[in-house]
Amino acid sequence: MFAQFALHERLLKALETLSFTEPTAVQAAAIPKALEGRDLRVTAQTGSGKTAAFVLPLLHRLLSEDKPKSGARALIMLPTRELALQTLKEVERFAQFTFIKACLITGGEDFKVQGARLRKNPEIIIGTPGRLNEQFNAGNLPLGDVEVLVLDEADRMLDMGFSEDVLKLAAQCPAQRQTLLFSATAGSGLREMVEQVLREPETLMLNRVSELNEDIRQQVILADDNAHKEAILQWLLENETYEKAIVFTNTRIQADRLTGRLIAAGHKVFVLHGEKDQKDRKLAIERLKQGAVKILVATDVAARGLDVDGLDLVVNFDMPRKGDEYVHRIGRTGRAGASGLAVSLVGHGDWNLMSSIERYLKLRFETRTIKELKGSYKGPKKLKASGKAAGVKKKKADPKKAGAKPAAKRKPAAKPKTGPSQVVSQDGLAPLKRKKPAAE
């Protein structure tokens, strides 16, 4: 029960209203440590309840001491607009019986409007590193009163090239702040960020990357080419039982093209990628959540922070380029104890990516064949080792053995210009004694 954490009564009231009863594993592990004021480095799988694990202790701290004249007291940095917006909604839900205000600062929105929001002095600022850094450079983001700094999906921020912005903003916060760093993976690249931002942190490893949600079936279907992939995708969307589905591609161009094909086939589809403005991205997610559309085609911009009830089918039209990206893609389904299906379409160019992801996760994907769409591609051909490659030397035929034909006599070489007493062998290796010409 959440009551065991001795959270502020207004937070407990909100939890009761929201029907939050039993904490998840990451919440049970992180909340008590965070309430003690410890710096934390937490690794837990996507969909495990990480947001509440840092929002509840943060709100408790702000409620425990009233500081009406201070600036922003908490800063939450996240890699994408979608995840930032989702976090804002979670903060508002848990803070519904308090007077705590939060504001959102991300790209894709009017810069001056955001500056006006910041001048209203919200207690919590939630945003993406790039736009937060721009507001800081413009003098709109005072960080001298920050008591709690949260870096959520820190591994993704690192992958997206935000490390410099994150470290710069963290350095502007007071040294005695509390810092909570959350990630879905424990990549070695986080070491520098951890060393510079956290003070004697306690590490909570809730799961290793190979321990993916057991409720997610992970399948692979081999495909001959993109046209074959499209046919398989159409079949899956028409024959699988699902409430909502997301299809991942590696590029914006592929996402747009695939969306057009699916719409032409009669499917209701929205597309989500980095070229879409914030209004369109919000609309796509809201339509999917409301059930106005069942299918979302997206690049990895949607692999973080997209939390949609009933999203039970994920299709990797393109295999992700990294194991961590695979983890976050399939983490869109099978959330909060629900079951899900993740299907990856693997062609000739995807095989090595698939194999590397299997090695990374230390598992084997389930291979599936659709009878009506069985292709010819079966994976890379095994090269047969030649005798030379295998280290086997061929023996020369022994003319003395029974049944062996003697080697044909070599024809005399053309008369050389090396002298009257010698001729050069045809292989040029050694002089031969000159023979008298046969009688004509």
Image: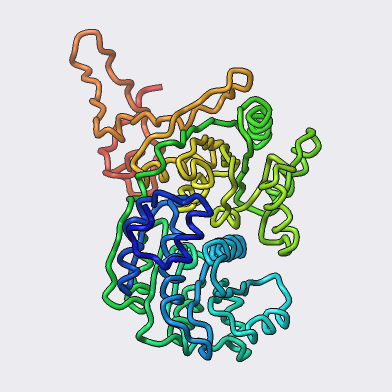
Frontmost residue, 253 versus 14: 14
* Figure coloring: rainbow
111 on left or right of 139:
right
Residue at point 48% right, 81% down?
Answer: 73
Residue at point 49% right, 32% down?
Answer: 219
Quarter of the picture containing the C terminus is: top left
Q: Position of residue 373 (x, y in %)?
A: 62, 22
Query: Hey, which quadrant is residue 425 in on the image?
Result: top left
Tell me if residue 314 comes above or below residue 63 in the rendering: above
Frontmost residue, 220 versus 15: 15
Q: Position of residue 392 (x, y in %)?
A: 24, 30
369 on left or right of 267:
left
Q: Position of residue 215 (x, y in %)?
A: 44, 36
Residue at point 34% right, 31% down?
Answer: 385
Q: Is residue 404 visible?
A: yes
196 on left or right of 368:
left
**Residue lying at the far top of the rendered structure:** 403
Q: Position of residue 289 (x, y in %)?
A: 66, 47
